[in-house]
Image (cartoon, rainbow, N blue to C red):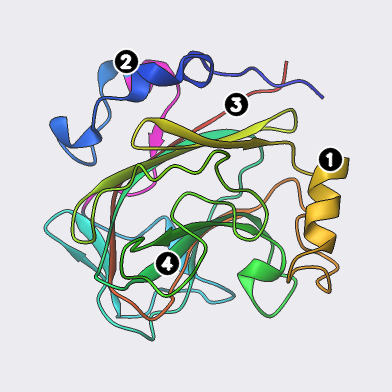
Amino acid sequence: MKFLLPLLFLAAPLFAEPAAQAEPNQLSAEEKEAGWELLFDGKTIENFRNYKKEGVKDAWQVQDGVLILTKKGGGDIITKKEFEAFELTLDYKISKEGNSGLMFHVQEISEKPWHTGAEIQIQDNVDGHDPEKSGWLYQLYKPEPMVDATNPAGEWNTLRIVITPEKCVHWMNGTKYVEYVKGSEDWNERVAASKFADKPHFGKPTKGHLCLQDHGNIVSFRNIKIREIEEK
């Protein structure tokens, strides 16, 4: 199955300008023309709900145009809509020693979203307590050679990912981190050697929800934008 890869996917350096230069949570005319949509408009959480729930717990708040997990107990939240092949960008700001994550292709067929969806790590790389760093695909893919393009805790970072059957790529603040093919032989070998080995549905869905993780720490998001990549 072939998908139309967007021009930005082929020309990563064009994305090097920080998103903070533009008005947050807005789409330009060019973005609208290219098929981008906002998953967060800076005002409501209407595009999300808690995993296996109808609404969103009060620990998740919208404050000054930012989606914030203000305290532990908010639970993981997922998009109401499911996505297959797509390009996504978001800004995140993690608290000191904080940890969170972004999962994709999540299906509500198990107790936890990470039982199906692969997780892109979000954390404070300096004082965090997890050896897996921001932008890595948790326990599966990390930059080689090692690179850390993140800004410190309390500052905004821009994560961009492209997920297609042919290729998946992560960028952090305009720096390419990892590239892989989901479901490939290499992928399957890495899964078998990871903590996901005993999760029969992990990484199997090719379509699903996006998930923002509650790891018990304060984390903020804005400029959550997505465009689906159409099949040829």
What residue is disc 4 on?
100
Picture quadrant of residue 31: top left
Residue 51 showing in the rendered view: yes
The residue under the point 31% across, 25% down is 16
Taking depth in this image into account, of 101 and 150 the one nearest to the observer is: 150
Question: How far across and how far down the image is residue 145, in percent?
Answer: 54, 38
Question: How far across and how far down the image is residue 180, in percent?
Answer: 69, 37
Mark 2, Cα crowd under 10 Å, few <14 / some 14-19 / many 20+, is few
Q: Distance from label 4 to label 2 (Cα)?
A: 31 Å
Amino acid type assigned to the residue bearing label 3 in the image? Ile
The residue under the point 55% across, 72% down is 51
Q: Distance from label 3 to label 1 (Cα)?
A: 20 Å
Which sits earlier in the primary sequence, circle 1 or circle 2?
A: 2
Kindly check if marks 4 and 3 are in contact, taking CB atoms under 8 A apart as contact.
Answer: no
Question: How far across and how far down the image is residue 83, in percent?
Answer: 61, 44
Question: How far across and how far down the image is residue 38, in percent?
Answer: 36, 40
Picture quadrant of residue 113: bottom right
What residue is disc 1 on?
184
Extent of the magenta region: 31-42
Of the two numbered discs 4 and 3 in the rendering, the one whose residue sits closer to the viewer: 4
Residue 229, numbered circle: 3
Kindly check if marks 3 and 2 are in contact, taking CB atoms under 8 A apart as contact.
Answer: no
Q: Distance from label 4 to label 3 (Cα)?
A: 26 Å
Mark 3, Cα crowd under 10 Å, few <14 / some 14-19 / many 20+, is many
Which sits earlier in the primary sequence, circle 1 or circle 4?
A: 4
As drawn, is 191 to the left or to the right of 87? Answer: right
Q: Distance from label 1 to label 2 (Cα)?
A: 34 Å
Which sits earlier in the primary sequence, circle 3 or circle 2?
A: 2
